[in-house]
Image (spheres, grey):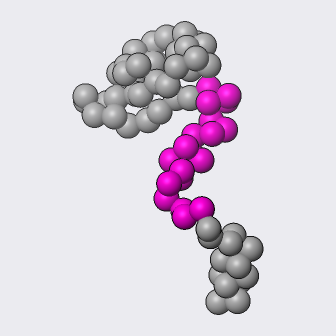
């Protein structure tokens, strides 16, 4: 759902309720500036974006150890 920032300001409570079920993109001057998500949608959001970016055979512990050793 895409709505203007003015509309969100005028009826914030409604959009907070809607955010529990829908992703809401807020625009200013027709350009997207923010996203309103319900708490339940927030959990997998980042992980959904990372799927496929990190190879399955990567050893996370080894990467962390290497990163710590550099600092």
Left or right placement of residue 35 versus residue 61 in this view: left
Left or right side of 59 for 9: left
Q: Residue furthest front?
A: 57
Above or below, 45 against 30 in this view is below
Viewed as shown, does residue 30 lie left or right of 26? left
Image coordinates for residue 24, horizontal then vertical, percent: 46, 24
Predominant SS along the magenta part: helix
Place of residue 38 in the rendered image (x, y in percent of width and height, measured from the top left): 62, 26
Residue at x 34%, y 34% (from the top left corner):
32
What residue is drawn where x is 28% and y is 34%? Answer: 31
**Residue at figure coordinates x 62%, y 68% from the top left:** 57
- The answer, for residue 64, to whether it is visible in the render is no
Q: Which quadrant of the figure contains the C terminus?
A: bottom right
Q: Residue at x 55, y 14 (%)?
A: 18
Q: Which residues are magenta?
A: 38-56
| Visible residue check, residue 49 | yes
Residue 33 image offset from top left, x and y in percent = 38, 37
Q: Position of residue 65 (x, y in %)?
A: 73, 82
Above or below 13: residue 29: below
The quarter of the displayed image where residue 1 is located? top left
Furthest-bottom residue in this view: 70
Marker count (numbered): 0
Residue 43 lies in the magenta stretch? yes
């Amino acid at each position: 759902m895409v709505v203007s920032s003015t509309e969100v300001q005028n009826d914030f409570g409604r959009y907070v309720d809607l955010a529990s079920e829908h992703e809401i993109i807020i625009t200013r001057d027709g350009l997207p500036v923010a996203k309103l998500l319900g708490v339940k949608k927030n959990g997998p959001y980042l992980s959904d974006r990372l799927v496929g970016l990190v190879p399955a055979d990567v050893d996370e512990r080894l990467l962390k150890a290497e990163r710590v050793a550099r600092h």
